[in-house]
Image (cartoon, helix red, strand yellow):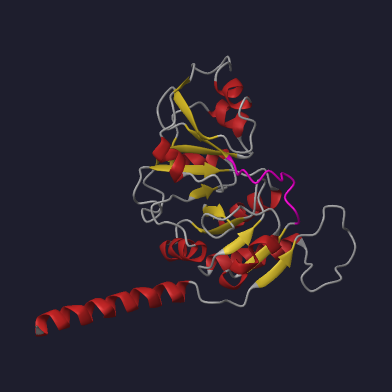
Amino acid sequence: MNSVRSAASELVKVRGTRRLAAANMCKELKTKMLRLLPPTCNGPTTNEEDRTDDEVLKCTVKALQDGHVVAVPTDTIYGLACLAQNSEAVRKIYAVKGRNGQKPLAICVREIQDIYKYCKVEVKKELLDDLLPGPVTLVFQRSEALNSALNPFTSLVGVRIPNHAFMRRLCQMCEEPLALTSANVSAHTSTVEVHEFQELWPHVAVVVDGGPIGDQSRLGSTVVDLSVVDKYRIIRPGCRVKQEMPQILFPVPFLPRLMCWSANMDCQRTWGKNDL
């Protein structure tokens, strides 16, 4: 009987420790609200939150390098980001969002050449040039350079280069990939304005307000699996016109014909409809 009580006591302690760890990851921060200035604004700032884009970038980079999660605008929807090579920060982003630990995070880089460091690319560069930058996530086999604690359950990784000047400069200044997911509580609707994910503000270090996202569809990026040589599959249609993808992937003269194979439903569930 004593052994049973002892085992039960230990179980309670373990569960309590896990809950405390999760609470610490999601503890409230003194969040900085930073607003990107419209491109046409050349005059002096009138609000403490209205800083130059360079100041916003420096503040956001500092928060990322300190291991925090930040909220940022992209070319599709608002996202949560952290340094992909920082394992503790990756755990935080899952905790903040309440995301299933078996669902992957994409990475975000500045230039196509950066993809080759973190992915094993089996298609010609011309195809990447056609698709990126833009609202597309390309899935490749991951390379050994990518943090093994990021998506440890799969040999694949999705990579994005958003068509968004702030995000590309942010990646450049961080000099490493960002882990990226949508800025919403898991399974909730994706967001195109910062007030729509206000419940997450206390758990991120910086919220970068880039204004309303131009594409109001909330569909997130189109996810294309290019991990198999000479083949592709559209895992999620996303916001890039569905009919446009085969036109890019099939009749390009300098490419071998890429054969489409049907998307696995488990894979479709893994890349949720509300993700970046």
Question: Which is more toward the observer, 246 or 175?
Answer: 246
List the single residue furthest toward the right.
43
1 within the magenta span: no
Residue 159 placement (x, y as % from top left) = 51, 43
Residue 225 placement (x, y as % from top left) = 46, 33
Q: Residue at x 64, y 58 (%)?
A: 72
- In the rendered view, would you say 259 is above or below 3? above
Q: Residue at x 60, y 73 (%)?
A: 202
Number of numbered discs on residues: 0
- Please indicate, yes or no, whether residue 173 appears anywhere in the rendered image: yes
In the rendered structure, the answer to whether residue 251 lies left or right of residue 25 reads right
List the single residue furthest toward the front.
1
Residue 37 placement (x, y as % from top left) = 80, 59
In the rendered structure, the answer to whether residue 192 lies left or right of residue 26 reads right
Residue 125 placement (x, y as % from top left) = 54, 29
Q: Which stretch is magenta?
A: 211-221
